[in-house]
């Protein structure tokens, strides 16, 4: 399977979220058909471990999305709630649709 390229210029949505007492800034962009195409995350504490984890998970998720992975493949807790900032970001991006 090949990677689906995004347009050079694209609309993005940015918002803040809180999860497990940590605050994050999240952004996402969509393909022309409305599917989420990329995710950016950062913690409010630059260079912290949680910031690195959030950024790395967003890069991995963005690549997976561009190779056709569905959003519902991302992790949630046993009750189906967001368990990571990436989960919370993708849930919010679907709610904004």
Image (spheres, rainbow, N blue to C red):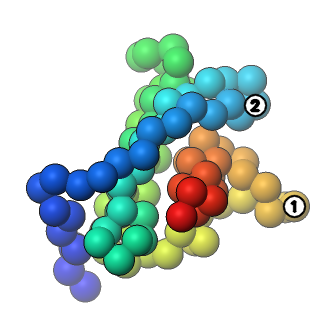
Q: In the rendered structure, which disc, 2 or 1, sits on the residue that comes first in sequence?
A: 2
Left or right relative to 81: residue 27: left
Local packing at callout 2 (Cα closer than 10 Å; few below 14, some 14-19, many 20+) is few
Is residue 56 or residue 43 the one in the foreground? 43
Which disc is residue 79 wearing? 1
Instruction: Say which quarter of the image contains residue 36.
Output: bottom left
Could you tell me residue 13's position as x and y percent? 42, 46
Could you tell me residue 52's position as x and y percent? 44, 29
Residue at coordinates 66% horizontally, 24% vertically from top-left?
Answer: 22
Could you tell me residue 67's position as x and y percent? 31, 74
Which disc is residue 68 wearing? none
Is residue 75 or residue 30 the one in the foreground? 30
Vertically, is 89 above or below 97? Answer: above
| Residue that label 2 marks | 20
> On the rendered image, what quadrant is the N terminus found in?
bottom left
Residue 53 at least partly seen:
no
Left or right relative to 40: residue 21: right
Which residue is situated farthest in the right direction here? 79
Residue at coordinates 74% horizontally, 24% vertically from top-left?
Answer: 21
Instruction: Say which quarter of the image contains residue 19.
Output: top right
> On the rendered image, what quadrant is the C terminus found in?
bottom right
Vertically, is 36 above or below 27? Answer: below
Could you tell me residue 33's position as x and y percent? 35, 77
Residue at coordinates 52% horizontally, 25% vertically from top-left?
Answer: 43
Residue 34 at least partly seen:
yes
């Amino acid at each position: 399977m090949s990677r689906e390229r995004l347009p050079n210029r694209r609309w993005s949505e940015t918002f803040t979220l809180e999860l497990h007492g940590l605050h994050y800034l999240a952004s996402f962009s969509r393909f022309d058909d409305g599917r989420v195409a990329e995710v950016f995350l950062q913690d409010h504490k630059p260079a912290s471990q949680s910031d690195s984890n959030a950024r790395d998970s967003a890069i991995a998720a963005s690549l997976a999305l561009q190779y056709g992975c569905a959003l519902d493949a991302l992790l949630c807790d046993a009750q189906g709630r967001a368990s990571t900032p990436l989960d919370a970001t993708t849930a919010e991006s679907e709610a904004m649709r």
